Amino acid sequence: MRIFYSSLFYILLPFIFLRLLWRGIKAPAYRKRWNERLAFYSSSALSDVAWFHAVSVGEAESVFQLVKCYQNAYPDGNVLITTTTPTGSARVKAVMGKKVEHVYLPYDTPDTISRFIRHFRPKIAVIMETEIWPNLFYYCGKNRIPLLIVNARLSERSERGYRKLHTFFSRILANVNVISTQSSIDKARFIQIGAEPDRVITTGNIKFDQEIPADLIVQGQTIKNEIFCDRQVWIIASTHKNEEQVFLDIYKRIKNKCPDLLLVIVPRHPERFDEVDNICQAHQLEILRRSQGSSCTPDTDVYLADTMGELKKLYAAADIAFVGGSLVPVGGHNVLEPAAIGIPVMFGPYMSNFKEIETGLLSLNAAIQCKTPEEIEKNLVKLLGDSLFRKKMIDKAKYFVLENNGATRKNMTLIEKFL
């Protein structure tokens, strides 16, 4: 079966590169560093590394906590972080700089994975969340590289797909030493798709352990005072196609009631910056882009965050957050960041990627789930007008985050067992 999978991957490679070219029209970074995707490297690399893989920005934010913990324990150890997307790559470089080595994860063919392993000679492989690559896992097993999937999660939809090839994936997962899951539900799903039960444990979600430095809060307040001119700020974070329209319509409806309100939009993907700008202009709204470097005026309606890696600072500059990817069937994004920073959080009905977090927050009335534009508008007006209600939500959300932290340390303990 793996031979068939590999043959199919080779056949699809030309089309995969054509897709990179197509995506590169809006995001030029997709046209660069193709050699890394085939595991060809022009320079020598640090070998005998602890290797961590994070697909994109969301997984990278989690892996940073784990890598910092590892570096504290092994200050002389070499660390490699791989990502799949340019946005994830940019985030690794921005946060970790030269403290780690970084390349793209090569495509999952036998020759590329073999070259990658020969080049870096990893002493341990730590895969974040839901990445299951048959050749990568096979060659880690063949080369006796301890392989861990940490902060693992598996959606119901993914479980159904993997179970159709249960025998194949049970053999692939046999190469994994430990799977540490975010929840007991995820644990059960990994076992259902073929993982050995005694290798699957639940350690919680590393996203609860994010650090909020004091200087980040100060930077946020500076943005609010100097750039947002101390206006009331509603931030819409990590938006996807067909979401911005909803918030722009709401903003226009309540603008007369809340003339001081500023709408901050942070698209999830940089290739959509211009698209979102055009949508705002079509609504005849006054828009200012962060890349322009100017401060808002009383006439500014929308502040478009068209830069990368600044979401936390912008959360700290806001009064209320709506986390996107949840009004369309994407599965939601990290709602713990604004909760930990200390602003009320709203999100939509599609939160399959964060089901336990969604349930926990809602059970404490620590967040608001809105299923329709009317519900968003109603709750926004309530939050804007009731400071005591806002404070209660903030306190409950911070309590929820604090009560659930500790997963990073648990996963670091697992890693140390294989070092």
Image: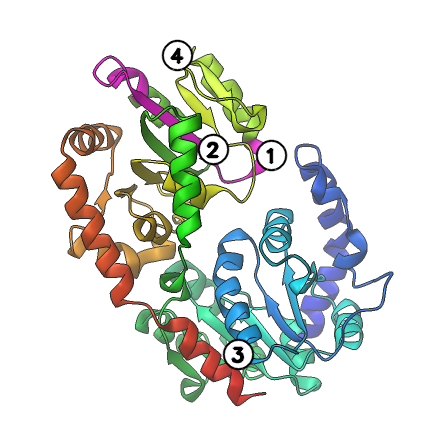
Q: Earlier in the sequence, mark 2 or mark 4?
A: 2
The reply to whether residue 174 is in sight is yes
Task: Residue at 57%, 61% (x, y): give it.
Answer: 54
Instruction: Give the Cα separation between the discs numbered 1 and 2.
Output: 11 Å
- Looking at the rendered structure, the kind of residue marked 2 is Lys
Callout 4: SS: loop
> Which residue is disc 4 drawn over?
299
The foreground one among 110 and 215 is 215
> Which residue is disc 3 drawn over?
167
Q: Is residue 327 above or below residue 106?
A: above
- Looking at the rendered structure, the kind of residue marked 1 is Glu
Number of other residues with Cα within 10 Å of mark 1, as a class: few under 14, some 14 to 19, many 20 or more = some
Task: Residue at 40%, 26% (x, y): give it.
Answer: 228
The spot of residue 347 in percent (x, y) is 30, 42
Q: Nearer the viewer, mark 1 or mark 3?
A: 1
Task: Verify CB contact (< 8 Å) between mark 4 and mark 3.
Answer: no
Question: Which quarter shows the C terminus?
Answer: bottom right
**Which segment did they paint magenta?**
251-272
The spot of residue 44 in percent (x, y) is 84, 68
Question: Residue 241 has which mark?
Answer: 2
The reply to whether residue 130 is in sight is no
Question: Residue 271 has which mark?
Answer: 1
Task: Verify CB contact (< 8 Å) between mark 1 and mark 4.
Answer: no
Instruction: Give the Cα separation between the discs numbered 1 and 3.
Output: 39 Å
- Looking at the rendered structure, the kind of residue marked 4 is Asp
The spot of residue 396 in percent (x, y) is 19, 54
Q: Earlier in the sequence, mark 1 or mark 2?
A: 2
Q: Nearer the viewer, mark 4 or mark 3?
A: 4
Examine the image and state in which quarter residue 158 appears: bottom left
Task: Residue at 60%, 66% (x, y): give it.
Answer: 53
| Residue 257 on the magenta segment | yes
Say whether residue 332 is left or right of residue 78: left
